[in-house]
Image (tube, coloured by chain):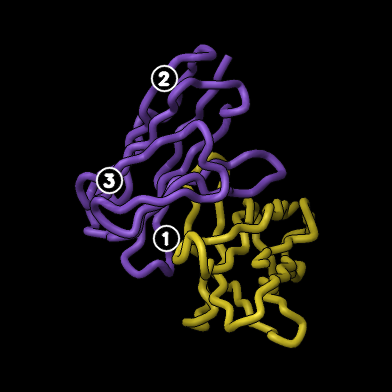
Chain colours: A yellow, B purple
Amino acid sequence: AQRVTQPEKLLSVFKGAPVELKCNYSYSGSPELFWYVQYSRQRLQLLLRHISRESIKGFTADLNKGETSFHLKKPFAQEEDSAMYYCALKRYGGSQGNLIFGKGTKLSVKP
Amino acid sequence: NAGVTQTPKFQVLKTGQSMTLQCAQDMNHEYMSWYRQDPGMGLRLIHYSVGAGITDQGEVPNGYNVSRSTTEDFPLRLLSAAPSQTSVYFCASSWDSYGYTFGSGTRLTVV
């Protein structure tokens, strides 16, 4: 079964510290993975997708097929990074084309 | 270019009432989806559409109906509201089933 796991509900770091938001997935084929960010009471925004290997707002994520992970990283956290982060996997089979979301990790960056 | 527009932003319903959540996009996207967001649950797919006239069920379709008569509009109908449907509802659209653009959400409370 396809599944996305974000093991941390809350991650709290100080400004300037490195950040790693964990995401593990379950899928036997070639996955397509995304990170979405939701700032307080706002809409979800696409942060990055693994297929384009972009770096957005200083965040990067590398797909590790061996560990079935797609962790989101940033070397120096900023207060404005405080938000809810969702990892998502493109769905295959039933509901094809839609996304399976993890339960999200709330990132809090303290001054 | 408004993107994905959802109305209303807030709604309070009594148990048993029906209502329609509106979603419209002006990007000529073929794919549209409805998700509900609940604390600790992430986002769960309710219904989706891969084009005008085509809809299908997601993970949690019970109690909801959709239709897609035009490319632009994808309304979500609650047939007989229940307290369990208290949630934040997001509509999303995409042209390639990759990166979805989300609306700003409808916060629904059923009392």
Is residue A101 something one can see in this rendering? yes
Q: Nearer the viewer, residue B95 or A22?
A: B95
Res. A25 image quadrant: bottom right
Residue beneath disc 3: B68
Q: Dot 1 falls on which chain?
A: B
> Element under label 3?
loop
Q: Nearer the viewer, residue B8 or B60?
A: B60
- Does residue A109 appear left or right of residue B55 in this picture? right
Vertical placement of A39 versus B95: above or below?
above
Q: Nearer the viewer, residue B61 or B103?
A: B61
Vertical placement of B54 versus A91: above or below?
above
Residue beneath disc 1: B100
Q: Residue at x 48, y 57 (%)?
A: A45
Q: Nearer the viewer, residue A54 or B38?
A: B38
Residue B18, numbered circle: 2
- Tell me, yes or no, whether the two marked residues, 3 and 1, touch with CB atoms within 8 Å: no
User: Residue A44, how many percent across, how many down?
Assistant: 50, 52
Q: Residues within 10 Å of mark 2 (few under 14, many from 20)?
A: some
Q: Quadrant of the N terminus of chain A?
A: bottom right
User: Residue B83, how many percent across, how many down?
Assistant: 61, 21
First of labels 3, 1 by sequence position: 3
Q: State the CA–CA distance, disc 3 to disc 1.
A: 18 Å
User: Residue A89, how many percent across, how many down?
Assistant: 58, 67
Check disc 3 and give the amino acid type. Answer: Arg
